[in-house]
Image (cartoon, grey):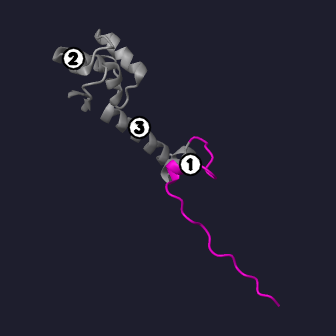
């Protein structure tokens, strides 16, 4: 397997798709990188030479695209900054709730987690 930015990319896939396995590289950036390196997008990863992989790595650094650890660090610092200045978005991140205005009454299970039962038994009124 070829390694780019510390990630093993699959051998059987086209290089255009395989690059998207790296955090921070999507389809558009993948095309931009391959055009900059001068590599055909239809080439399979297993058919690339070491020189081609080196071209891809150098193109990523030349284009100054933050990937993997560096990008994760930047995102984490941004969230931490929002929490420190006690902004609304920061408080939502801290509470584990959606930060971009989505409704939480009936959805948001991905952020909120498994349902927790709230409340207890209804009080029975005593007859007089």
Q: Residue furthest front?
A: 12
**From the viewer's perspective, is 121 left or right of 8?**
right
Q: How many numbered marks are there? A: 3
Would you place residue 79 above or below residue 55 in this image?
Answer: below
The disc at residue 75 is 3
Q: Residue furthest top?
A: 38
Residue that numbered label 1 is attached to: 108
Query: Whole-Å distance between the Cαs marked 3 and 2?
Result: 34 Å
* Residue 74 percent across, percent down from the top left: 38, 35
Q: Quadrant of residue 79?
A: top left
* Residue 100 percent across, percent down from the top left: 57, 40
- Residue at image point 29% right, 16% down: 59
**From the viewer's perspective, is 10 left or right of 82?**
left
Toward the viewer: 43 or 8? 43
Residue that numbered label 2 is attached to: 47
Q: Main secondary structure of the magenta part?
A: loop
**From the viewer's perspective, is 54 left or right of 72?**
left
Q: Secondary structure at mark 1?
A: loop
Q: Nearer the viewer, mark 2 or mark 1?
A: 2
* Residue 109 percent across, percent down from the top left: 53, 51
Q: Earlier in the sequence, mark 2 or mark 1?
A: 2
Query: Whole-Å distance between the Cαs marked 3 and 1?
Result: 21 Å
Q: Nearer the viewer, mark 3 or mark 2?
A: 2
**From the viewer's perspective, is 57 left or right of 50?**
right
Query: Whole-Å distance between the Cαs marked 2 and 1?
Result: 44 Å
In magenta, the rendered stretch is 100-128
Q: Residue furthest bottom?
A: 128
Q: Quadrant of residue 7?
A: top left
């Amino acid at each position: 397997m070829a390694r780019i930015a510390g990630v093993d990319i699959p051998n059987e896939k086209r290089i255009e798709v395989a690059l998207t396995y790296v955090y921070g590289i999507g389809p558009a950036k993948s095309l931009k990188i391959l055009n900059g390196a001068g590599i055909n997008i239809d080439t399979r990863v297993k058919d690339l030479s070491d020189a081609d992989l080196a071209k891809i790595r150098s193109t990523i650094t030349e284009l100054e695209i933050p990937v993997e650890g560096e990008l994760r660090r930047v995102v984490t610092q941004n969230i931490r900054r929002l929490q420190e200045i006690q902004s609304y978005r920061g408080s939502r991140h801290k509470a584990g709730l959606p930060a971009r205005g989505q409704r939480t009454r009936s959805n948001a299970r991905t952020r909120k987690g498994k349902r927790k039962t709230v409340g207890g038994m209804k009080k029975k009124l005593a007859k007089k």
